[in-house]
Amino acid sequence: MKQKILIILLFPFIGFSQQNNSKTTDSIKTSNVFILGEVIITNHQNKDTLNRITSKTMESQNKMEVSKALNMLPGVSLTASGPRNESMVSVRGFDLRQVPVYMDGIPVYVPYDGYVDLARFTTFDLAAVDVSKGFSSVLYGPNSLGGAINLVSRKPFKKLEYDGSLGMINENGYKGNINIGSNFGKFYVQGGFSYLDRNSTKMPSDFIPTANENGGQRDNSYRTDQKISFKIGWTPTEKSEYAIGYINQQGEKGNPVYTGTDTQNSLLLKPRFWQWPNWDKESFYFISNSAFDDKNSLKTRLYFDRFKNTLDSYDDATYSAQTKAYAFKSIYNDYTYGGNLEYNTKFIPENDLKIAFHFKEDVHRENNLGEPVRHFTDNTVLVGIEDIYKVNSKFTLIPGVSYNIRKNKDAEDYNSTTKVISDYPSADASDAFNAQIGLFYQLHQDQKFGATVSQKTRFATIKDRYSYRMGTAIPNPDLKPEKATNYELNYTASLFDKITFQTALFYSSLSDAILSVSNVEPGKAQMQNFGKAEYKGIEAQLDYAVLKNLSFNANYTYIERKNVTSPIIHLTDVPNTKVMGTIKYSPIKILLLIASSEFNSSRFSTSYGTRVPDYTLLNLYASGQISKNFSIDAGINNIFDKNYSLVEGYPEEGRNFFVTLRFFNSN
């Protein structure tokens, strides 16, 4: 206990943020950002260390998954769906249905339920990850109720750039990647390949064995993920650019069995023996920016995204037979296509005006093996306007408004008794208005103040409206959009070229929240626009370059979430308090040492009150450059082998290590 208290007390005094050391090491890495793939309101946003993680930071602390990279930011909490072995995040209390994920501004979230397993999205080929919280650009499109997450790819700036790595994780995991790019002036190409394979994760040594888990190596926790990405671009003029991109992700994973003690959890007596033999995604996209003159331009995004996965439910832990009533093979074969146009004009003095049009069609196709395929199709359209009005040299006003409409084209029901497919009753189109305004004031060169208000919405997903949830729910095709009004006050100050302090106060009021209402019919629930909730909190970050070779960072998040409609039903998965700190020390030019620590308070794991306890983690990393083009990285995560969970019954990994050989010419 004394050890935990000591670590927590040290948090305000330790840490390092490589994002904020942009004048030194990180300035080189951020030059590889594919600017055409960014979605930002003002240019200063891409330097905001409250909301951006760069490739250098992700590499230095071995953040191989997007979810774990995002967890380094204040206001973001690492979460998980234990029963599905999915890694996710919450942004100021909003989940991934309400904070959609994009790749270079193109939506990549799953059409059926709006979620995405961020463990399947590795960071090896990314230049940066941006998070917009509450006040996000209307140019992202619909459903950004609580913000948006944008994964920004790389762009080469030299005739030849390459970097890559080969590494080992514990004694049974391997990783490797390579990125190669070339810029020929008006043409450029960028490609990447990555591979990540783990036979299993390691349980903490003090884990007490249960009926479904004996400790040691976590049963059924294997994973394999590989990704190929390619982009070719043309820049005929300084202000015009055209790029075609392709991404192919292929993954498979096991699903560890519930090991908890919650007697109200059905998985205690009826465990799931699940495996995912494929979780595959393929994306084609075209992005362009055409400048007509110095004041007018048109940006275009066109995309086609395919998602396929298979879920196998087995009889028992041998994962060999599918004969029981609960065993099945579920197949998803989805695709999305769409595009958006953004017309940008500076014709009106002191105004930077953007008019946007978005179209998106989501197609979900599902069936169990031996059953016919059911089809679901949604069309979504958005028209939006956003302006940056510079009132004077210090004061900027940013209003935005959009109209969104979603129409269901196909929705098929299946009767497993009669083996007949029929159409669900048609539902009316669902529409919503979004509006926001931001006021930003430059107090002087080193201090900035901002205040924002945004009203955002989220359309109900196909799963929200049509899923029977394995026989426990009644579909509700007429669900209305959720609504949230988000308020924020933020402040940034720089002192003596050594200290940067950033903070934000936030408050969100939700209405028409989509919640499951029990016993609408005996023993069956239904998703309804039933809920009201309030989220409020503070986030802060302090960066201090103590010496040329020593710097630290600490960030802090506090959030309260209140279920106004039903206070006895708890809001899950988000800790009230998260504190992170990292210290960086380079005793000699070729050696970098990093220590990081993280504290999370307890969180509710179920709506009826099951909690997982607080935890503190300590990690150590080292990187040594052994020649001009090679370095060796090594590290230990969870040094004290803490037995902790994000979801009750699903322990996280115990002490683990990695060793990586890196090669590069672009650093």
Image (cartoon, rainbow, N blue to C red):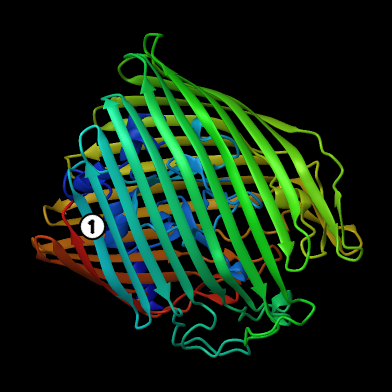
Q: Residue at x 80, y 50 (%)?
A: 412
Is 389 rendered above or below residue 506?
above
Under circle 1, the secondary element is strand
In this orientation, which residue lies closer to the viewer: 51 or 60?
Answer: 60
List x then y, in percent, for residue 509: 63, 40
Is 152 rendered above or below residue 649?
above
Dot 1 amino acid type: Asp
Q: Name the residue under label 1.
A: 163
* Left or right of residue 86, residue 578 in this image: left
In this orientation, which residue lies closer to the viewer: 155 or 389?
Answer: 155
The extreme top residue here reads: 348
* Left or right of residue 316, residue 249 in this image: left
The picture quadrant where one finds residue 227 is bottom left
List x then y, in percent, for residue 431: 71, 31
* Left or right of residue 552, residue 576 in this image: right
- How many marks the image carries: the answer is 1
Residue 246 appears anywhere in the view: yes
In this orientation, which residue lies closer to the viewer: 632 or 189?
Answer: 189
